[in-house]
Image: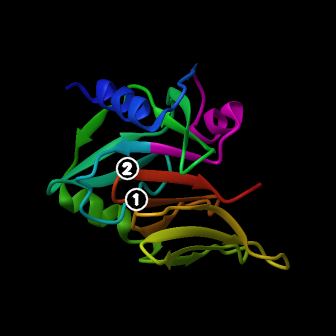
Amino acid sequence: MPYTDGIRAVAFLLGLSLQASHGGSLVNEMRRLGVRSALIVASEAVDESPVWSPTGDAIAANIEGQWKSIDLRNPKLVKGKWHGDEPIGALESPSLITISEAEVRNWAKTRIAGPREVVAKDGTKAQLLSEELGTRLVITRHGTAPETLWTTSLENCHGLALSPDGQQVAYVCELNGVIVTNLGQ
């Protein structure tokens, strides 16, 4: 099944209603769709925490032992819902390019990452908290109460990686793949 057909199949199984959107950076696409999160790699075979490129215009994901780069400069997203009524975008036609482990190690030299928690320079904290058999994504901004963005019921999410600009976080949800969430409101 081609990758885009896989997204459409996942969308069908999850009851997602898909709408196309085109052009701009990943952040701009997410804003235009009115979503805070986007599924950028739809695969249950992601093996490690994602790694941002030094400029934040790509993410590397280890899929079945091979590192793949996903270009985030001009994505085309479709809109859907997951974990109940939480809106999410998904890459419509992702281009996965094989990259070397040496290049990924080079990207990772300056990264801020953690299995369950990362803190941006401005003090914003992102946490993936275990909750029974699921996970909860909690964002805490300096001087504000923690905000739960979503909760899974039977899915483990982990491997947080903060974007170089500190505005997004990427992570793995084992039943979905690599997801990016905007830390801003």
Residue 83 image position (x, y, % from top left): 54, 51
Q: Is residue 15 above or below residue 109?
A: above
Q: Which residue is mark 2?
A: 176
- Nearest the viewer among 159 and 25 is 159
Which residues are drawn in magenta? 21-39
Q: Residues within 10 Å of mark 2 (few under 14, many from 20)?
A: many
Query: For residue 9, which quarter of the picture?
Result: top left
Q: Amino acid at mark 2?
A: Asn
Is 150 included in the stretch rendered in magenta?
Answer: no
Query: Which residue is at the far right?
Result: 143
The residue that appears at 47% across and 66% down in the rendered structure is 161
Left or right: 57 in relation to 125: left
Real-space Cα separation, disc 1 to disc 2, in angstroms: 5 Å
Query: For residue 137, which quarter of the picture?
Result: bottom right
Contact check, label 1 and label 2, Cβ < 8 Å: yes
Left or right: 38 in relation to 45: right
The residue that appears at 49% across and 69% down in the rendered structure is 135
Examine the rendering and report whether any part of residue 111 can be seen. Answer: no
Q: Amino acid at mark 1?
A: Cys
Residue 62 image position (x, y, % from top left): 24, 56
Residue 18 image position (x, y, % from top left): 53, 24
Q: Secondary structure at mark 1?
A: strand
Query: Which residue is at the far left?
Result: 65
The residue that appears at 55% across and 76% down in the rendered structure is 118
Q: Is residue 34 above or below residue 158?
A: above
Q: Which residue is mark 1?
A: 173
